[in-house]
Amino acid sequence: MADLTHFDQDGRAHMVDVGSKPVTSRRAVAAGQITMAGETLEKIRSGGFGKGDVLAVARIAGIMGAKQTASLIPLCHPLGLDHVALDLALDDDLPGVNITATCQVTGRTGIEMEAMTAVSVAALTIYDMCKA
């Protein structure tokens, strides 16, 4: 397990020590999609859901998800995020929604987990907003 940085020499999990790493500007982009019936996509487009604007709520949820990543992923370092943006695009060919999250940080460790969490939480929120 010597190559797996989240485990010590005895195989026990631990948070990696990044204290001696240099502070650098880091950026990660993650993408995903959620598919649905064409009728559901049309209802999102027309604003026909009683819970509110599906894409606006999903965008905010994705940002909140990025901010909570260290609470959700056990060995993930808490980061002071510099920027989180979500792009949600309706796609008639799926049919569904394409989700892209861009996250930036100035720090000692990567920000890819925050970007992937943002996409995941946005997709889950779209599902929740659209279910009966």
Image (cartoon, rainbow, N blue to C red):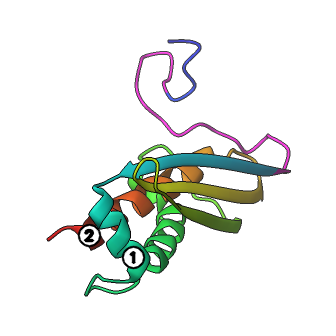
Q: Amino acid at mark 2?
A: Cys
Judging from the image, what secondary structure is the residue with disc 2 in?
helix
Residue 16 in view (yes/no):
yes
Q: Position of residue 92 (x, y in %)?
A: 46, 55
Query: Residue tagged by mark 1?
Result: 54
Q: Is residue 44 above or below residue 121?
A: below
Q: Is residue 130 above or below residue 114?
A: below
- Between 38 and 109, the residue placed more toward the observer is 38
Q: Looking at the image, which residue sits at the far left?
A: 132
Query: Residue tagged by mark 2?
Result: 130
Residue 77 in view (yes/no):
no
Quick one: quadrant of the C terminus?
bottom left
Q: Badges 2 and 1: C-beta atoms under 8 Å apart? A: yes
Was residue 19 drawn as part of the magenta stretch in this picture?
A: yes
Q: Is 18 left or right of 92, judged from the image as shown?
A: right
The span shown in magenta is 7-25
Residues packed near mark 2 inside 10 Å, few (<14), some (14 to 19) or many (20 plus): some
Residues packed near mark 1 inside 10 Å, few (<14), some (14 to 19) or many (20 plus): many
Q: Quadrant of residue 47?
A: bottom left
Q: Is residue 6 above or below residue 131?
A: above
Q: Of callouts 2 and 1, which one flags the residue occurring earlier in the amino acid sequence?
A: 1
Q: Position of residue 6 (x, y in %)?
A: 51, 29
Q: Is 20 left or right of 49, judged from the image as shown?
A: right
- Between 117 and 69, the residue placed more toward the observer is 117
* Residue 13, numbered label: none
Was residue 2 drawn as part of the magenta stretch in this picture?
A: no
Judging from the image, what secondary structure is the residue with disc 1 in?
helix
Q: Is 16 left or right of 62, judged from the image as shown?
A: right
Residue at 32% over, 58% down:
38
